Image (spheres, coloured by chain):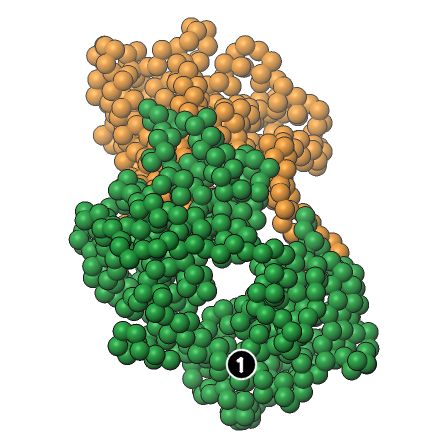
Amino acid sequence: MNEADHLIELKGMTKTFPGVIANENVDLALRPGEVHALLGENGAGKSTLVKMIYGILKPDAGDILFQGQPVIIDSPAHARELGIAMVFQHFSLFDSLSVVENISLGMDKDVPMETLAEEIREISDRYGLPLDPHRYVYTLSVGERQRIEIIRCLLQQPKLLVMDEPTSVLTPQEVQKLFVTLERLADEGMAILYISHKLDEIKALCHHATILRLGKKVAEVNVDDESTSSLAALMMGEDLATIVKQDHGSYGEIRLQVEGLNQPAFDSTGISLDEIHLDVRAGEVVGIAGVAGNGQDELLRALNGEEKCQSHACIMIDGKHVGLLDPNARRKAGMASVPEKRLGHGAVPDMDLVDNAFMTAFHRMGLLARGLINYPKTRQFADKVIEEYSVKTPGSHVPAGSLSGGNLQKFIIGRELHQSPDILIVSQPTWGVDAGAAQTIRQALRELAANGAAVLVISQDLDELMEITDRIGAICGGRLSRFYPTSQMTIEKVGLLMAGVSLEGDSQDAA
Amino acid sequence: MLPKLAKRPTPSRFMVYLSPVLALFLSLLAGIVLFLIMDVSPWTALHAFFIEPISSAYGLSELAVKATPLILIGVALSLGFKAGVWNIGAEGQLIVGGLCGGAVALYFYEQEGFHIIPLMMLAGVFGGMAWAAIVAFLRVKFNANEILTSLMLSYVAGLWLNLMVHGPLKDPEGFNFPESRIFSDSAMLPLLHEDYRLHIGFLLALVIVGLGWILISRTLLGYQIKVSGAAPAAGEHAGFSTARIIWVTLLIGGGVAGLAGMIEVSGPIGQLLPSISPGYGFTAIIVAYVGRLHPVGALFAGLLLALTYLGGETAQIQLNLPVAVTGVFQGLLLFFLLACDVLIHYRLQFKQPALAARGA
């Protein structure tokens, strides 16, 4: 292997932020035509590394060689000039403009609109990225919006394409289409740096993988020589316990029942809920899959009472109508919930953990005495949650905002679990949580169900849902699909449900 | 290149509390510069402003008289500001409270009895609450910005007071001056000492400080106020109704401001005049912030800001300085306080920033 073959080579890249080392002495090298995975858990430093490649962040130390020449990339414009293009996880598009207008805005040079539209059409034909240049962005699906970003990059004829977690917003079917395009680009000699923590995708697409853990490079491997579990072990640095689903077949009574729930969107960007029917029995974990922004947040808020329903009868807890009750009245009836957004929704960043423990637990844990907050008791409760769910923190006196995402999630889930609710509704239970803690949380959810509670998990992580749920369905555009026993489902079938396609029959292979 | 503001990872708690002291120190420095420009000896001026007024027992009692409304309203506004409800119309609520309390006093004119003062207090509290309720209603029902409505209602309140003292409440034997009758003794707040103007309203202010402290640090309502201000979505998750918090904080603010207005007319003033407050309701906003939105802080801040009123008067008498110096000092204090707060939460970054314009 000749060094000179490398398109780009990073040596000893280091970047620190106040209080955190995001990257420490990371090396990375890519050849033309190679699809190279940058693999790591949330917070491992993947985004920091690629932001340095794209000139958004300046490294504290380290060298970048591009086509053998040392370069200092000081801005994204400079990166584009060199031939580096990047597709971000979050798109920067104007909804009210057309595709071609959006692309024109991001161009470094001026190109007449019609010429540009022609070029867009050409590229979209060549790489199987169907897209009408004159459509308005607000009419496009998330997958189509991503195509705009990809075409925007391809117009610059880059030598290196960086993709930051491109599939987190796509259905499995859209992912397949994206991979065909990427393979085609690699065949034409483009180098692709593919950032992800999804192992199946990396197995399917990539040649090499560089694995980051806590900001350091821990390995560079040939993907074909590894299995998904060996990659997982490298990524997480530990072996994972497997979840035990106890033998069931007999569930208890219906604890949570939703009958014809309709909810108009609460703002112009929200999703309205349409005829939601749902029931969760004692001892059961039910999963709702879905691409982000299809009504998950709205559903959680309608279920936990943050948005009251239009009729009292549309939600029942243990057979009692609660549709018009507020969150606290529903808590009294036995329902607990964990929203997706932790800071600012599940917890108050500027308040300490004691105050945050009080937030949803004061009634069920009896933390109020004669109208006054019982602080000693609240502190005990907070300390117990911290201890039981091994939340890493200097103590219960620190503000919630100073905890890492995973630790805060452990605290919030622990706060709800410790109240032993009869019904738990949890959104994205392990998003951003390190693998060990994620497994603890999943195990705890199963145990809660085993003790007779009804658990509803809303998640975008299909592997997680397949692993811990008994029944699974999906939400798409504010409508719920039918629910199927998880044992009869595959990722592909759930993918169809996520796209709003109904499965033919109950258990036939529709994918 | 221009320096940029970069957020500090963890602002120092110590500095957060030191900030008012720093701001006071900087205001004094700026004051010295100001006096030099005006060709007045800074030492004489500062002495007249800050030392002279409190170098006698009478001065101290006057300080407490002026501080009473500031402390009362400062405590009440702190609660609202903590909840993110920006009631800046306490001046109007004070005026309506004073007007209602005064109207009760005039109704019982030439009567005696211990029922008059409590009735006046109730009228003052309800008057202020009613005025603030308009703001709460508009905010909850139509999402009208409470900063604008409460401020504009202050001017409406001032006009109402004027209308009343020019009309129905005018002293019939007052040679057509726009003033009410002087209240009878039973409508005047008892004095704490017969030589001074200091009245029991000051004790009431201390009680409100204590109640405010317990409310904010120990009760469920105080907790809800803090959560709703710090993270409204978290408040809704916890089941605290935002509308209820808006109503409660505005009613408390209005009620206490109304009480302060009643105390003013029934204490130091003793009748209804076209103007019953030198802007106490606005100055109390500064009191709340200098006091770090804490009731005990508001106590000290109220005394400090009261001193700027007294000092302004002394400086006017002794040095012929314009009375606007009071306003200038109050403005400087608020300005420096806000500046200190910004620098406590952010730091200036002069070198090339690590982050370019576009984030991901």
Q: Nearer the viewer, residue A309 or A206?
A: A206
Q: Is residue A119 above or below residue B231?
A: below
Q: Amino acid at mark 1?
A: Phe
Mark 1 lies on residue: A179
The picture places residue B14, in percent across and down from the top left corner, at: 63, 32
Chain letter for green?
A
Residue at (35% x, 65% y) in the render? A486
Q: Colour of chain B?
A: orange
Query: Which quadrant holds residue A271?
Result: bottom left
Q: How many labels were placed on the picture? A: 1
Which quarter of the image is occupied by the N terminus of chain A? Answer: bottom right
User: Can residue B201 be seen?
Assistant: yes
User: Can residue B105 be seen?
Assistant: no
Q: Nearer the viewer, residue A241 or B257?
A: A241
Q: Is residue A36 above or below residue A231?
A: below
The picture places residue A371, in percent across and down from the top left corner, at: 33, 27
Residue at (68% x, 48% y) in the render? A19
For label 1, count other residues whose C-alpha is less than 10 Å away and answer few (under 14), some (14-19) or many (20+). some
Q: Is residue A308 above or below residue A479?
A: above
Q: Nearer the viewer, residue B170 or A187?
A: A187
Q: Is residue A385 left or right of residue A75?
A: left
The picture places residue A223, in percent across and down from the top left corner, at: 63, 74
Q: Nearer the viewer, residue A110 or A133?
A: A133
Q: Is label 1 in a helix, a strand or a loop?
A: helix
Which quarter of the image is occupied by the C terminus of chain A? Answer: bottom left
Residue at (34% x, 19% y) in the render? B266
User: On what subunit does the disc labeled 1 rest?
Assistant: A
Residue at (32% x, 62% y) in the render? A471
